[in-house]
Amino acid sequence: MLGALPAAAQRDEDIRRLIVEDSLARFSGYCPCPYSYDRGEQCAEKSVYSRRTDPYLYCYPADVHWRDVQAYRERMGIPYQRR
């Protein structure tokens, strides 16, 4: 999903959302994020994110470091545009 629309993802906020979506798509277990559901119940504190057992799991755009955004731009060939 990360490569779906890289040209359209010009803003840092858009790239952060794409990185979160990719992180969740790669996750193979249950309850990745506090807002996820498992067997009809919200995961909350039992989520992998809440237990911080996977440092590469992003659940929120605010979790994505600016270096990750910069690396994504470089990988996808997206220049930074000031607005």
Image (spheres, rainbow, N blue to C red):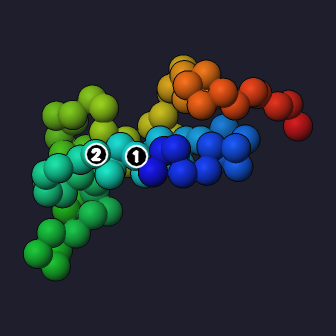
The image quadrant of residue 78 is: top right
The image quadrant of residue 6 is: top right
Residue carrying label 1: 22
Q: Which is nearer the eye, 72 or 58?
A: 72
Residue carrying label 2: 26
Residue type at mark 2: give it. Answer: Arg
Q: Residue furthest bottom?
A: 40
Q: Secondary structure at mark 1?
A: helix
Q: Is residue 48 above or below residue 65?
A: below
Tag 1–tag 2 contact (CB < 8 Å): yes
Q: Quadrant of the C terminus?
A: top right
Q: Residue furthest right?
A: 83
Name the residue located 51 percent from the left edge and 26 percent from the top edge. Answer: 68
Q: Secondary structure at mark 2?
A: helix
Residue 77 x, y percent position in the rendering:
66, 27
Judge whether residue 77 can be spotted in this image.
yes
Name the residue located 54 percent from the left edge and 51 percent from the top edge. Answer: 4
Judge whether residue 61 can be spotted in this image.
no
Name the residue located 19 percent from the left edge and 62 percent from the top edge. Answer: 43
Give the number of the disc on residue 38.
none
Lateral position of residue 59 relative to residue 33, left or right: right
Q: Is residue 39 above or below residue 46?
A: below
Residue type at mark 1: give it. Answer: Asp
Lateral position of residue 42 relative to residue 12, left or right: left
Q: Is residue 63 above or below residue 38?
A: above
Q: Residues within 10 Å of mark 1 (few under 14, many from 20)?
A: some
Q: Is residue 36 above or below residue 51?
A: below
Q: Which is nearer the eye, 25 or 51?
A: 25
Q: Residues within 10 Å of mark 2 (few under 14, many from 20)?
A: few
Residue 32 x, y percent position in the rendering:
23, 52
Residue 10 x, y percent position in the rendering:
73, 41
